[in-house]
Image: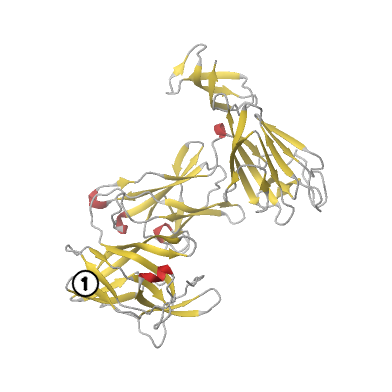
Amino acid sequence: MMTLMLTVASWAQDDVVVTPPTDLQTEEWLLTAQRYDPTEYTVEAVQTLNIGVKGQDVYVQGLNLYLPEAWVKGTMENGRVTFSANQYYGSLADDEGTSYETYFAGCDESWFDGVSTLTPIDVTFTVNETGDCWTTATVLVVNTLTDGIAGFDYLKDVVLSKPYDVVATPQAPTIAYYMPYDNSEGYGGVSLDFPPLDVNGKPLLTSKLSYILYKDVEKVISPIVIPAQQEDGESFVDMTEIPYNYTDGYNIEAHGYAAYFYEPSSAFNRIGVQAIYRGGNEERMSEISWLNLQPYADEAVIFDFNAMDKDTTPVSTNSSNAGDITEDKVLQQGNVTLTISPCEGGNTANRYWVDYNLQAIQLRLYGGKLTFEVPADCTIEKIYFYAADWNDYNEFDCGEFSDDLVWTGSHQKVVLTIDNSKPNTKLNKIAVVVKEESTGICTTYELPVETLQVFDLQGRQLQGAVKGMVIEQIRMANGQVKTIKRLRK
């Protein structure tokens, strides 16, 4: 299967695209199928189509993801709809400028089993008695040949379904990709996996579907504002609810493919998305689907290098080595000890450095080790790394490390060895989640100087020297007020 890096629509001189009648009346349909994926074999596929019928002629738009405006034409007869092979979609160009003519085609399902000597065939759908569901055993191909099979897209187990305007609860979308706010770029964004289906897998009318993005900052949940560009190309309007099919070609792409926000997201604990459907004149909402970004402050010990005072903390510059780490530097937060060892054998010392874009301190590592330790009655359960740069050859002595820079395990001591090749590792913040073995709750903060209020686990205020698991509101030694769980004995 060829990989298309960039698509550009154009029309060839020798092939003729399908053009529907100007008075064709269309309805929204939904395609569901299994799409060929080179890494996972198949993945779920959902596409919105427009279908119009005039006499025995059937016109379908949207089968080609790369040219969604292109049409194919079929014929309906005796409960079947047949589309002939080699109907011309249009021309595509890849990232290197190579052009491909693309055609509608079908092929045998044996292609998914590795059979390559196949030719394009017609595609016939069987129509159910009510006419709102079409099925086929033939594979749909966005093909590049007229005498063989070599395509950009392969779909099997294809079902076309007609949605109705009825009351329905939408499936919760998920965040397929999250881009945190970047100070230099000035924006962040998300890309959604957002099939227009209800919780029972039935198709929804996309014209009645929308979504809202949410942020969770220390358990305060609120919508994220997306500025949509207006038609004049200059003014913007703030949007919190985004229609499924809406695009401004700038900050919002249709179907949840992209939505960009301009709000710093370093404080976000979670980012979420919720679908809204207004079918049958009734509004229904999905559950909020959350992507966890960092633990709450009362659940972790934080080493925040960006928050260090750059006016009083020694930092290195192009003309000063004041922030160089030339011997073990020991940092203590709560009951977590972090030891930063010097870089050995490298040309550049580990150091504190003020990042130009952030205008804040970073811990920049060119080698050496980071060692995390907790007391004997505790274990480290997770470590979240917030990095401007990360060397993929950095290595832990235990536990598991994920692509989103989260270490998971259960150890009293965790050692990270920093690779001394490029890129160097630039850390903005580290969050450490710890569990106290005796209670399951970690005492992650310095001792309070004053207990303000005490509650039970149901939130009822308690009086006197109560025992058992309680929730304490306390004033810390630094003057900050926090709420923590504690086992009183």
Q: Is residue 359 left or right of residue 485?
A: right
The residue positioned 54% from the left and 26% from the top of the image is 484
Residue 388 in picture, x, y percent from top left: 64, 51
Q: Is residue 474 above or below residue 175?
A: above
The residue positioned 76% from the left and 37% from the top of the image is 329
Q: Quadrant of the C terminus?
A: top right
In front of the other: 414 or 311: 414
Q: Is residue 47 left or right of residue 435?
A: left
In front of the other: 31 or 154: 154
Q: Is residue 76 above or below residue 241?
A: below
Q: Is residue 406 left or right of residue 89?
A: right
Amino acid type, residue under disc 1 in the picture: Arg
Q: Residue furthest bottom?
A: 14
Residue 75 in picture, x, y percent from top left: 23, 77
Residue 38 in picture, x, y percent from top left: 48, 65
Q: Residues within 10 Å of mark 1 (few under 14, many from 20)?
A: some
Residue 65: tell me if it is visible.
Answer: no
Residue 342, by quadrant, is top right
Q: Is residue 485 above or below residue 426?
A: above
Q: Is residue 473 left or right of residue 108?
A: right
Q: Which residue is mark 1?
A: 80
